[in-house]
Amino acid sequence: MNDGKHSPYRYVVWTAVAAVLLYFSFEGVKWADFLDVLKKCSWGWVLLSMAAGLGAFIIRALRWRLLLLPLDPDTKRTDCYDGFAIGKFTDTFLPHVGEFIRCGYVSGPRLSYDKALATVVVERSWDILTLVALIFLTLAALWQRFGSFALDNVWTPLRQRFDFSLWWIVVVAVLAAAAVAAVISLRGKSPFCSKLARFFSGMWRGAAACLRMKGKGLFLLYTLLLWTLFLMMSLLIIKALPGQVALGWVDALFLMLVGSVAGIVPVPGGFGAFHYMVALALSAVYGIPWETGIVFATLSHESQAVMCVVCGCVSYIHQSFSKK
């Protein structure tokens, strides 16, 4: 927990990674042609995609509130939305920090910060499981169409970068168990271990409370609506491209999944990683020119980034005036 002094260096490193990925994404792109294609896009579809992104914000806030209600029945919808919007705004500049920021907007006397953070862990874990399930289902149903891309551009680089041997799993599990045992045994002697034990105990209780939430069917419905909106965001940008781009909802689903995987890379706002992966997918799978792929990635990413910044600023102003 004492690595705060290293955080700026970590952000600098990931910002540099984003800059490198952006450079490779736009390397060789003729800017005159790029701007000309942007001018020919149907911006009405882009605005509709941004509206779908706003709808996804609202759905995620409502779904998060379902996890918070067992811990604090007085949790407000506006606080959940504002916290989430401000968190996404923060993620635009500091990757994966927004998850911690939004907990501060819902925590209070009845809802401690650690329990609020536990609900975020549960929510994000559910989203990751949903993403993995969608990827496997899509590849299983359309392996001949998308399988080679997944093997050549996702699995092979990961396998080369990391050693997925059983020994690594055993070592990590043993180290984790030893760390937990040390914290438990020293919690009465070390203030640091005592605070750490209370923090994770609060997270455990918060996660357990999530399992007792009412409206599990509504939670699943919100999840279905959320991923449908993600799909619509991708499909609407396809419709915004000039010319006859023969891509349908299945292709929009594939591009949505590629963009979601790229979003896991901890670069500020997903810049660079999203552009490179999506343009690569369009080029490798469909033979679409890199310039067109970059236009699609730019419209998809920057339109949602603008929406995040606007919503985050509005929510911050609202919170500033509504709470002293």
Image (cartoon, rainbow, N blue to C red):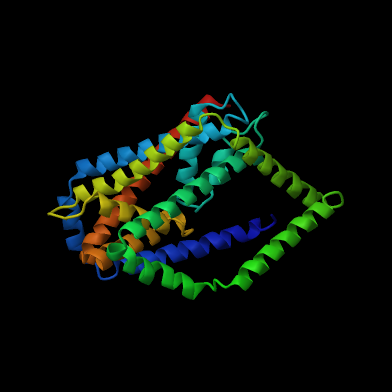
Percent from the top left, x then y, of residue 120?
56, 43
Percent from the top left, x then y, of residue 212?
60, 33
Percent from the top left, x then y, of residue 29?
24, 67
Q: Which image quadrant: the N terminus?
A: bottom right
Q: Is residue 301 visible?
A: yes
Q: Residue furthest front?
A: 141
Q: Which image quadrant: the C terminus?
A: top right
Residue drawn at x 79%, y 58% as measured from the top left: 182
Please identify the quarter of the rendering in which residue 323 is found: top right
Q: Nearer the viewer, residue 212 or 313?
A: 212
Q: Is residue 259 visible?
A: no
Q: Nearer the viewer, residue 21 or 225?
A: 225
183 above or below 98?
A: below
Horizontal relation, residue 179 to residue 281: left or right: right
Residue drawn at x 21%, y 64% as measured from the top left: 288
Residue drawn at x 61%, y 28% as measured from the top left: 72
Percent from the top left, x then y, of residue 137?
38, 54
